[in-house]
Amino acid sequence: MINGQAAIVTGASRGIGKEIAKQLAKAGVKLAIMGSSDEIHKTKQELQTSGHNDILSFRADVSKENEVEHVVEATRNAFGNVDILVNNAGIGLFKPVEEITVEEWRKLFNVNVQGVFLLTKLVVPIMKKQQFGTIITISSDVGRYSIPKGSLYASTKYAVQGFMGSVSQEVRDHGIRVGTVNPGMVDTYFADTQQGEEKKKDWLKVEDIANAVVYMASAPKHLVIDELQLHPLIQQYPRP
């Protein structure tokens, strides 16, 4: 049961992160949600309208240490603890390697990797003191295999897989569970596309990913779900 637990969810302004916040709120979780625009406060208002009142919202950049520190500290002050962290914030870019700029390389690594590092680094001491916690990172299926024009994005997801795998081994003796959700094609706003496009009608839905997160977080304390890989039935992909 996760009712009454406190969670931080990044990238919760829309898409997957917003749906994760909605499903956790329905499960009775107290929430601190982060987003890179003022749209994050609209998510908070929508959740409050639905009857979920234990919610904080922060416009914050996951790649900036001082902003992340503020979110974690404010969450702990408001709710007394941090039981769940969902590292969801991420951006995508797909182009031939020779067209990738250094600025684009830095931007994706700052958000997709440094953001995961900073949030995880800051909540681990809290969870160690509690001797309990669940850290779930939304990664990608291309953290397990590569695709054309995906050298930059896949690199960030391979980095996330390696980082979370090592962290998992460091913290499990403290009752902290670490896992990743690796989705394939999801109908969302990813890579500047629109949610609900006709070509995406058979893709995974944001609810599928959110349900996976709730499932992982709700597992009995003695059980850790290291990884969930999700694909729509129509997606062909390399198998290891």
Image (cartoon, helix red, strand yellow):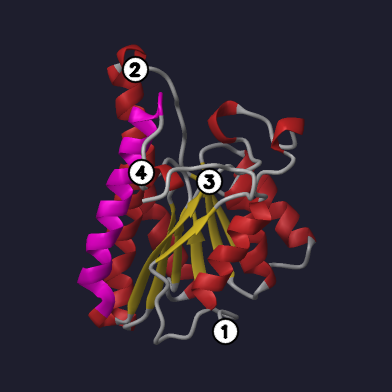
- CA–CA distance between discs 1 and 3? 28 Å
Mark 3 Cα-neighbour bin, 10 Å: few <14, some 14–19, many ≥20: some
- The spot of residue 221 in percent (x, y) is 43, 85
- Amino acid beneath label 2: Ile
Q: Earlier in the sequence, mark 4 or mark 3?
A: 4
Residue 65 seen in the figure? no
Depth-wise, is mark 2 or mark 3 nearer the camera?
A: 3
Nearer-N-terminus badge (4/1):
1
Which sits earlier in the primary sequence, circle 1 or circle 3?
Answer: 1
Q: Main secondary structure of the magenta part?
A: helix
Q: Earlier in the sequence, mark 2 or mark 3?
A: 2
Q: Dot 1: within a 10 Å radius of its alpha carbon, few (fewer than 14), some, or many (20 or more) residues?
A: few
User: In the shown orientation, is residue 107 left or right of residue 35?
Assistant: left
Q: Nearer the viewer, mark 1 or mark 3?
A: 3
- Residue topped by disc 1: 1
Marks 1 & 3, CB-CB < 8 Å contact: no
On screen, 112 above or below 28?
above
The residue that label 2 is drawn on is 100
Q: Which residue is disc 3 drawn over?
A: 184
Select label 4 or label 1 by which is in front: 4
Q: CA distance from mark 4 to mark 1?
A: 30 Å
Please tell me whether mark 3 sits on a helix, a strand or a loop: loop
Q: Which mark is residue 157?
A: 4
In this rendering, the answer to whether 9 lies above or below 82 is: above
- Position of residue 160 measured from the top left corner of the image (x, y, whole percent): 32, 49
Residue at (40, 60) in percent of width and height: 72
Q: Amino acid at mark 1?
A: Met
